[in-house]
Image: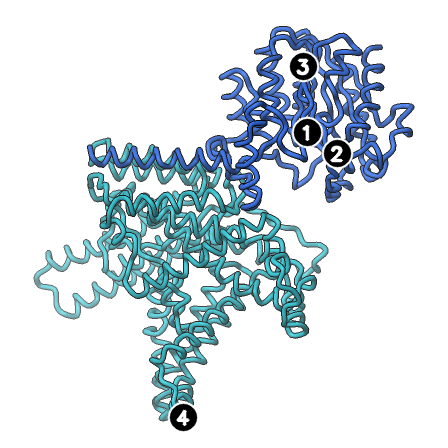
């Protein structure tokens, strides 16, 4: 009996340390505010926007609400894999009864074969936190983490340790009253509302190791088609879009035309609308230096210009 | 599935529960089923080749046993048998036994040769005949741990042949001895007389044993995940493109390669011993703080002990006691070369053993060179032992002096690290390039962490600090163990709060600083052999 008690105490201690480390090391990001806002608004939402950081940095749901007369929410996350998006959408369709339209932001990066392309564990965990249903969580964990990576759900701090200074700053941020009030506390990641997060901090240009790769990833294309099928079966209107890249970055993508044609064909064959904003007639007016925060992502100014085009294209 | 995967932990938990909860008579059956399931899950194909080896070994040992029994019965039945008659019968039986042994070994090593050496041999022959451009690769998936289980089963049949052990009559028990999951991937290469009784014994759960086993597992995880895996990117990058790095970086890479290899391999051993300990099975230690060796000969008594002992017992002794080697000694003695009569046969045997050790690692010129270089160093150090002693006495250097021992240890560490690091380079040219770089600019040009730990620093300074602490912990642990013996059994007798603190410190150090991929699927370095 004494031994069992000691063992239990040991497990409790391990759990407490895990809790402390998770609190101290997992960085503050937009997801904290997102969860708070999503919880309050998901039942009313009729339009959702899905995608990765390109979408997160470009689509402003409040403008959509105003211009298109919908109740939209941007559920995109940085580094969101297309597989992630599939399970996330499944969960949203099961838990949000009013969904009528899905805007799916696609990214060339998500469809090319690269050795480095692996779903990011912290990004996958952010989506895991957003899932509403138990079934959705179980299915997501099973498919996204595999058994060997599933312990990341408990020991989340494993993938986030940068430095002692970042830990100290993180703890300070998490203990601040603003954090408890669900206000932005990080200077690099401002959160406005309805899931849209913008940043004027200059990011580094993404590595270009895979730019010369042109082969499209079959698995990603399959998941993309499954997403569109899922929407069609649920009777939801689907609009697929590609946010603009900087001209410099776009010129590096050698397989871009093939990607665009394939993604368009899959969308149209499933009754979805597709629009590539890199081909927008006014694209030339979007200046690389003043409208982008880095090689791939729009800044707030760029996003406001983009949203005008977005609403015009999809309202038509 | 590897030892460092979450799925293995679940697998082991279920196995241990069944092992202790089901009737004790079934314990070895559970181990057998678990071992085959592990092999199946780890190798992703049916363990048919391992089963073939088991069948050959079982058939061979039973056949030898039957020949022995027949001979015994015949001699017992025939009281009128003359001394010469008995001798004749024994000779005939010996011939049969030898034939069975050779047949079994041929099949056993034939399987190993097909999977491990055929692709490389075919590549070499085709390159020689038709040139490198027209080589048709033979692609064979090498069964997991084939080198280890082939050697283990070979040792068993040779021991039966030498009448050191009785053949096991139960086929499934033989199968368990060949396939025991904790040692199938990287050894240690077990001996039947030591391992088999433990595998077939009936035992109850011991909390003390489980505690010690768990601590060993955590310690192994620390070595593998925190030290070896964090060092890997830096070492791989230097070996792949040595021209881009300075001489100091190459030298540091070489030293850290020695640390990485030890952390990776001995980490696996600690994990394997820990899991076995929980099940009540004591695996023979495969490492005894090898970097405290004062010579290369001593190093090989402390590093991969089971493989070295295997070659010593089954190859070296067989060669040295063979008629041909005895004849060499006799010839030299006849010509009055007394010292050479003792040394030459053992030196030839040493070189052969090291050639085979290199070949055991991989069928490549690189590994064979590595083996031969080890052999040559040993032969030279034995041959010039007296010369060294004379120099030492002239310089008034006592072998017992602490600083001299430190010098010897550092020398051995550098020699072994250099030899092992050599095998990491993709070509002789790349290795030569690194030597040129080292000679050209041996001094560091910066003290920045990004210069000293290139590539590794990409994972973050915090991981580099964790790795440094891991190396320091390994060093302190080795010093204590060298002076006072194994640490964990003693720790398990101390206050439980101390035990819990150590266990939690190890657990969270592993979780915080591990340098493997997030799904922990990276394998062990020695698993490729």
Q: Dot 3 lies on which element?
A: helix
Looking at the rendered image, the disc whose residue lies closer to the viewer, 3 or 1, is 1
Looking at the rendered image, the disc whose residue lies closer to the viewer, 2 or 3, is 2
Disc 4: which residue: B394
Disc 2: which residue: A200
Looking at the rendered image, the disc whose residue lies closer to the viewer, 3 or 4, is 4
Q: Mark 1 and 2 residues: CB-CB less than 8 Å, in contact?
A: yes
Q: Chain of mark 1?
A: A
Which is nearer the N-term, disc 3 or disc 1? 1
Task: Work out whether residue B118 or residue B372 is closer to the camera in this orientation and state it.
Answer: B372
Looking at the rendered image, the disc whose residue lies closer to the viewer, 1 or 4, is 1
Q: Quadrant of residue B472?
A: bottom left
Q: CA distance from mark 1 to mark 2?
A: 9 Å
**Image colour assigned to chain A:** blue
Q: Chain of mark 2?
A: A
Q: Is residue B108 visible?
A: no
Q: Are marks 4 and 2 on the same chain?
A: no
Disc 3: which residue: A229
Which is nearer the N-term, disc 1 or disc 2? 1
- Tell me residue A162's x, y (percent): 57, 44
Considering every residue shown, the one lying at the far left of the view is: B79
In the figure, B97 relative to B349: above or below? Answer: above
Disc 1: which residue: A190
Q: Dot 2 lies on which element?
A: loop
């Amino acid at each position: 009996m004494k031994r069992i008690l000691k063992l239990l105490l040991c497990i409790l201690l391990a759990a407490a340390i895990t809790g402390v480390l998770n609190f101290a090391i997992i960085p503050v990001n937009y997801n904290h505010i997102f969860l708070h806002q999503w919880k309050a608004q998901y039942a009313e939402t009729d339009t959702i926007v899905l995608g990765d950081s390109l979408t997160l940095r470009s689509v402003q749901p409040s403008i959509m609400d105003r211009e298109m007369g919908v109740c939209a929410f941007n559920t995109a996350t940085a580094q969101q894999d297309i597989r992630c998006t599939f399970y996330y959408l499944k969960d949203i369709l099961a838990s949000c009864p009013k969904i009528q339209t899905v805007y799916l932001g696609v990214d060339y990066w998500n469809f090319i074969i690269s050795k480095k392309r692996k779903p990011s564990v912290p990004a996958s965990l952010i989506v895991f936190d957003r899932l509403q249903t138990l079934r959705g969580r179980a299915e997501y964990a099973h498919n996204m983490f595999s058994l060997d990576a599933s312990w990341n759900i408990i020991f989340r701090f494993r993938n986030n340790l940068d430095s002692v200074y970042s830990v100290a700053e993180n703890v300070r941020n998490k203990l601040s009253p603003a954090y408890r009030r669900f206000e932005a506390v990080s200077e690099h990641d401002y959160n406005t509302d309805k899931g849209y997060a913008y940043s004027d901090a200059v990011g580094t240009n993404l590595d270009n190791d895979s730019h010369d790769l042109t082969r499209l990833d079959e698995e990603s294309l399959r998941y993309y088609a499954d997403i569109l099928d899922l929407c069609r079966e649920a009777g939801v209107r689907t609009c697929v879009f590609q946010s603009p890249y900087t001209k410099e970055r776009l010129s590096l993508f050698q397989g871009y035309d093939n990607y665009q044609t394939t993604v368009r064909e899959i969308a149209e064959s499933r009754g979805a609308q597709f629009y590539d904003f890199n081909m927008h007639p006014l694209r030339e007016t979007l200046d690389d230096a003043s409208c982008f925060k880095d090689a791939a992502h729009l800044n707030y100014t760029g996003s406001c210009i983009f949203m005008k085009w977005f609403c015009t294209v999809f309202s038509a | 599935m590897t030892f460092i995967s979450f799925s293995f932990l679940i697998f082991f938990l279920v196995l241990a529960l069944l092992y202790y909860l089901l009737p004790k008579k079934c314990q070895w059956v559970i181990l057998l089923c678990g071992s085959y399931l592990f092999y199946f899950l780890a190798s992703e194909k049916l363990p048919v080749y391992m089963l073939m080896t088991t069948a050959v070994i079982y058939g061979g040992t039973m056949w030898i046993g039957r020949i022995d029994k027949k001979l015994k019965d015949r001699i017992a039945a025939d009281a009128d048998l003359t001394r010469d008659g008995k001798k004749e019968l024994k000779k005939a039986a010996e011939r049969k036994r030898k034939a069975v042994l050779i047949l079994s070994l041929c099949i056993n090593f034939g399987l190993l040769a097909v999977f491990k050496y055929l692709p490389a041999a075919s590549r070499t022959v085709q390159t020689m005949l038709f040139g490198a451009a027209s080589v048709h690769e033979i692609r064979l998936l090498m069964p997991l741990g084939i080198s280890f289980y082939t050697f283990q089963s070979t040792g068993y049949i040779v021991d039966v042949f030498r009448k050191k052990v009785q053949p096991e009559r139960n086929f499934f028990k033989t199968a368990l001895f060949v396939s025991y999951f904790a040692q199938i991937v990287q050894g240690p290469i077990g001996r039947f007389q030591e391992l088999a009784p433990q595998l077939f014994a009936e035992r109850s759960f011991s909390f003390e044993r489980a505690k010690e086993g768990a601590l060993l597992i955590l310690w192994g995880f620390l070595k593998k995940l925190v030290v070896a895996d964090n060092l890997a990117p830096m070492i791989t990058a230097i070996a792949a493109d040595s021209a881009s790095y300075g001489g100091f970086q190459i030298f540091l890479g070489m030293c850290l390669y020695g640390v990485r290899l030890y952390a990776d391999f001995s980490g696996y051993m600690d994990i394997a011993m820990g899991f076995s300990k929980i099940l009540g099975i004591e695996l023979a230690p495969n490492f005894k703080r090898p970097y405290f060796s004062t010579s290369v000969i001593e190093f090989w008594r402390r590093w991969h002990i089971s493989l070295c002992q295997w070659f010593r017992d089954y190859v070296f002794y067989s060669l040295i006691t063979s008629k041909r080697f005895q004849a060499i000694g006799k010839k030299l003695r006849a010509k009055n070369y007394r010292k050479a009569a003792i040394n030459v046969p053992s030196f030839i045997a040493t070189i052969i053993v090291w050639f085979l050790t290199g070949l055991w690692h991989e069928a490549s010129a690189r590994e064979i060179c590595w083996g031969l270089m080890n052999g040559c160093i040993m032969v030279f150090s034995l041959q010039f032992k007296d010369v060294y002693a004379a120099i030492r006495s002239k310089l008034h250097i006592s072998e017992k002096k602490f600083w001299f021992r430190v010098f010897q240890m550092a020398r051995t560490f550098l020699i072994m690290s250099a030899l092992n690091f050599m095998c990491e380079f993709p070509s002789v040219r790349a290795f030569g390039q690194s030597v040129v770089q080292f000679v050209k600019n041996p001094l560091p040009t910066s003290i920045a962490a990004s210069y000293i730990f290139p590539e590794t620093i990409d994972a973050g300074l915090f991981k580099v600090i964790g790795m440094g602490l891991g190396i320091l912990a390994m060093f302190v642990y080795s010093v204590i163990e060298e002076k006072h013996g194994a640490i964990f059994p003693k720790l398990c007798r101390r206050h439980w709060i101390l035990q819990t603190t150590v266990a939690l410190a190890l657990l969270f150090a592993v979780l915080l600083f591990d340098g493997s991929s997030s799904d922990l699927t990276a394998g062990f370095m020695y698993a490729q052999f």
